[in-house]
Amino acid sequence: MGSGSGQWSVENRAPVRNDSVVSEYVPETGCLSIIVLGASGDLAKKKTFPALFHLYRQGFIQSQDVHIFGYARTKISDDDLRARISGYLTPCKGCERTHDEDVTQFLQLIKYVSGAYDTEEGFRSLDKAISEYELSKNSTEGSSRRLFYLALPPSVYPSVCKMIKSYCMNKSDLGGWTRIVVEKPFGRDLDSAEELSAQIGELFDEPQIYRIDHYLGKELVQNLIVFREDFGTDGRGGYFDQYGEVVLGQYEGYTDDPTVPDNSNTPTFATMVLRIHNERWEGKALNSRKAEIRVQFKDVPGDIYKCKKQGRNEFVIRLQPSEAMYMKLTVKQPGLEMTTVQSELDLSYGQRIRGDQQHFVRRDELKAAWQIFTPLLHKIDRGEVKSLPYKPGSRGPTQADQLAEKAGYVQT
Ligand code: NDP
């Protein structure tokens, strides 16, 4: 969670969104209630509350104007919830206050309400608790902000959204807002994702919905947008017109795990070739391997330096294990001779990336992603695409390299 271009912010100045309209920047003065639904669960305990604690330690959550509510069916007290999560609140390096002091004060911001996900009674109790807190802060109803974080299985999203819409909305549009944050997975395939999007979309406008994809939250991925703009062309509107041939692999011994069915076809490795057809990317071959994306530039027709070739120019985006983005470029070797050498232009290793902006998935992006992968996933489910065996610790199935070669990729 964090501030961003038109995203949720707990800072004093943030874009005001009265439902679908992002208007001018004005100070947000009302108090903020963060409501974690599914507070008894694993995600809430291990990730959501620790992330909120992190924001608190960094000063993004101020105790005077932010309160946190946990909501779930499990009947526990405020202190029970606090005890569950306290072990996951890790110490902060270099913080002035002591860790114990931070934890104690942070936990005091948390209140727990128990209730079902589909009954009026539970959500009325939740609304009452939030409203009481808002009144205690002398915040007029209209300027208060309510952020609902659904740390729940997606099957519950529609009913929970209905309940929020019916009983827990911020009551006025005088500068306040209500937003919901949902976690992956957003469906199993295109149809189920579209159904879920439609159900939530009936209740909330797209600017009120924040779909978290942890890859999009990675700073490097966010930097791609900046990088794309550096090219100076309009990148929007591009489309993938097909999903490539694909090589899937499964490491030998995967099915020895007693929890994995003997006949499992689940891939643990994938190499795929995706082709993008738009003006912006014309003439480039895209190869994706593990958590790395390589855009290899084809040979220039009539290359005058052919005899001293250094390899193709390549743009590499590595998402993991350590984030990196660099360009392998053939450049002129300094000196009098007209010779070439391959050099790396390191654009954004981790330490160079700045900012804590996070991105979320919009409905049309989600749809586009599912449109690409659903046909493949269905083929896997039907057993029409088999995972090829490969040795643990190897580069994966040899067929993957063959596929890349067939798609015009040259090892450099
Ligand atoms: P849990 O299974 O722990 O569910 C969270 C809470 O939801 C439970 O404590 C339970 O609360 C309630 N719940 C569980 N099943 C149901 C059900 N069938 N109907 C109604 N309520 C139910 O899930 P997680 O916390 O692990 O994950 C929540 C969401 O986040 C999921 O969509 C998951 O895929 C996603 N996610 C999880 C990650 C993780 O690290 N755990 C990472 C990334 C995404 P109660 O019974 O008290 O109401």
Image: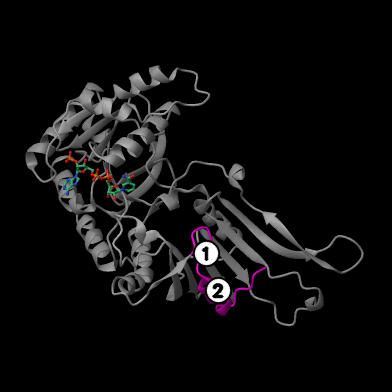
The answer to if 394 sits in the magenta stretch is yes
Q: Which residue is mark 1?
A: 289
Residue 399 shows in this picture: yes
**Of 409 and 256, which appears nearest the observer?**
256
Determine whether the beta carbon of the residue marked 2 sits less than 8 angstroms from the nearest atom of ligand 1: no
Q: Residue 330 location in percent, x, y?
A: 74, 66
Q: Which of pointers 2 and 1 lies earlier in the amino acid sequence?
A: 1
Secondary-structure class at tag 1: strand
| Residue name at image x 11 percent, y 46 percent | 118
Q: Residue 378 location in percent, x, y?
A: 30, 72
Ligand 1 quadrant in view: top left
Note whether 76 is above or below 265 in the view shown: above
The image quadrant where one finds the N terminus is top left
Determine whether the beta carbon of the residue marked 1 sits less than 8 angstroms from the nearest atom of ligand 1: no
Q: Which residue is mark 2?
A: 404
Question: Image quarter for residue 385?
Answer: bottom left
Q: Which residues are magenta?
A: 391-412
Label 1: how many Cα within 10 Å (few below 14, some 14–19, many 20+)? some
Secondary-structure class at tag 2: helix
Q: Amino acid at mark 1?
A: Arg
Q: Amino acid at mark 2?
A: Ala
